[in-house]
Image (cartoon, grey):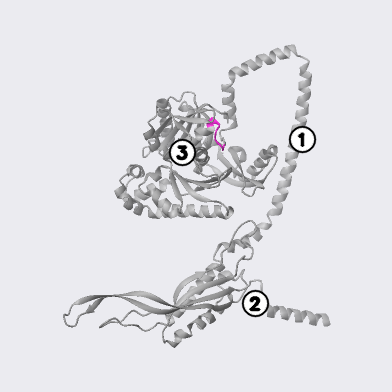
Amino acid sequence: MEKYPIVWGLDIGHSSIKAAKLSRTGNGVTVMGYAIEPINVTEDGDRDEAVVKALQQLAQHEEFGGIPVVASLSGRQIFSRTINIPVLNPKKVDKMVELEARQQIPGNFEEVEWGYHLSPNPDGASNDVALFAAKRELTDELVRKCKRAGINLVGVSVSSLALYNFVRFDQEFPDDESVIILDVGAENTDLVLYQGETLWMRTLALSGNDVTKVFMKKFRVSFEEAETLKRQIGDSRQAEKILKVLEGTLNELTSEVQRSLGFYKSQNPNAKLENIVISGNTFRLPNLPEYIAERLRYTVNILEDLDKIQVAGGIDRENFLRDLPSLGVALGLALQGSGIAKANVNLLSTTEQLERVLKAKRWAGIALIVMLGAAFIVNLMAVSRVMNDNIAMSRVIISKHDDNKSRVEDSAKVLAEVEPLASDLKGYSAYGRKGVVHASIEGVLKTLQEFIDKNPLPASEPPPEKGGSPRLQAVYVNSIEVPTFPYDKDNGPFRPLIGERLVRVTVRIPRTENDTLKGLPQQIVDKLKVLPVPDYLKSFYPAEHLFAHAQVKNEVLSEDSYWLVDNTQTDDKAGTFKKIQEERKLAVRILTFECHFADPSTPTASAKSATATATTAAASAAGN
């Protein structure tokens, strides 16, 4: 994409169009204007026509004229995927990425517009390539809408990249930190992380429309009425009620974000995550930023001001900063058009780009034709040299074509070798279900519950006058510690555990004269030793019992406190109720059990017996 000194960024959303106009001088950027134009669609109306009408009104009010415009497609309209390639000679990157794109992008490759952004992988030995593709019919439709509105569209990018470009250029964060960007749009949510030159992004399904649908159901209104209600809520006194209504949807959103960040940290264990930048009109809901900060445990940064981009004097700065949280994508698009952005993906069709270049350079083309004519007349002998050059170039093209054909054939051979491995890989699907950790927690809790059910204790320490206290349990569970599963390039999910293969269980047992409780620790040990392997583990955990060994590792004598509260006691003399609240003490034994996992590689007793039988039979056959 060419660099333009003045450019508009155009973010076409679900309910409005956000536009920002930037001017670049050297490395400095200034906001020259901005606008937010609503898209008014009636219940049975044509949305495409409503978008065109909004674009026409916007172009007329803001006098777009022939100023270049960069627009975006949302994550819902874009196919995106990140692949990894080795560090190559820069001249070979385009060919390698195109070969991968043809394999990764679904459908007819000739019917899509695609682009990519290259960033270094943290391992230093490879590059991450973010592939983006859109059906050509989508980009062509956007071009038609802009032409009808008289808008000079020069580029089509991706909303998540645009937001990254804006935050990366303008907002200041420490260089060693991985910055999180969360943009909740109407139809999808973009999650972007970057640290230095590295970039990682993911599109989440939950969106602002899901929040609107909650309002629809709660207040029994249409989608448009619910959308209006959501935008107009500003009374902080209603914040608690609003968050209560949205609690389920917000929990789902934060859970998706946490899962994605967990995956990112598993791939980048040294990543430093502290700050999250939020964007989108959804975050205008009262107390929502605070809610997100509490759930995700990161410092939430609202787009309240600009760090590097200047604002022209003719703009009402107070109003601009109030609208800034919804302008991040538009500003990022304009930064790309100015040539100052880090990511530069243009999904505008090559035919359209060429047409605009020729249109912009038409006078230069005419001059070039005149000069070529004069040169042809004066230097007729140069024709022979040019023809020879063309012949040489044709030979190079033929050679490159043959080389490409050979590479495609090699790729087909590799794919043919990979296909038989699919059935082997399918066998690992069981690791995605319940595993050893689940089985150990489930088995230990079930065992302890059996002792609780079978050994109720009599009431102890009766309160003053009448009554009796609740029965005590035989066992109280303090904690269950299971092995962790570190995951990095040296320790994958299918390798043996690095740490100790054991489970630590800490319980509290009341100290009483009850003979059953005195022998309870050994009973628990005996039960844990024979804990059976669940059915869902047997296919890849060939052992008879889950634990090979169990023992009492430590015992500490202690004392617990609890409160007895009884409001039902009566005063025999007065015949009235009186309230009893007393702190009680309970002598306890704190015991720590250690249960060592069985080694699945060790044959079970039945397997050993079968092996011995087979060996005997073989020896007998040899003797005969």
Give the camera-side residue of 474 and 329: 474
Q: Closer to the observer: label 2 or label 1?
A: 2
Q: Position of residue 620 (x, y in %)?
A: 79, 82
Range of magenta residues? 337-343
Task: Let me know if residue 106 is in the magenta part.
Answer: no
Label 2 is placed on what type of residue?
Thr
**Dot 2: few (<14), some (14–19), or many (≥20) neighbours within 10 Å?**
some
User: Mark 2 to mark 1: distance in Å?
Assistant: 62 Å
Where is residue 101 shown, x and y percent of the image? 63, 43
User: Which residue is denoted by mark 1 in the rendering?
Assistant: 399
Position of the N terminus by quadrant: top right
Q: Nearer the viewer, residue 614 or 47?
A: 614
Q: Which residue is mark 2?
A: 604
Residue 565, placed above or below residue 210: below
Q: Horizontal placement of 608 versus 592: left or right?
A: right
Q: Which residue is mark 3?
A: 328
**Quarter of the view holding residue 35:** top left
Q: Earlier in the sequence, mark 3 or mark 2?
A: 3
Q: Residue at x 76, y 14 (%)?
A: 380
Residue 464 at x, y = what percent? 27, 82
Quarter location, residue 598: bottom right
**How packed is label 1: few (under 14 Cα within 10 Å), some, or many (20 or more)?**
few
> Residue at the spot x=57%, y=41% of the render?
132
In the depicted structure, whether residue 274 falls above or below residue 597: above
Question: In the shown orientation, is residue 197 left or right of residue 18?
Answer: right
Q: Secondary structure at mark 3?
A: helix
Disc 3 residue type (three-letter): Gly
Query: Which label sits in the foreground, 3 or 2?
Result: 3
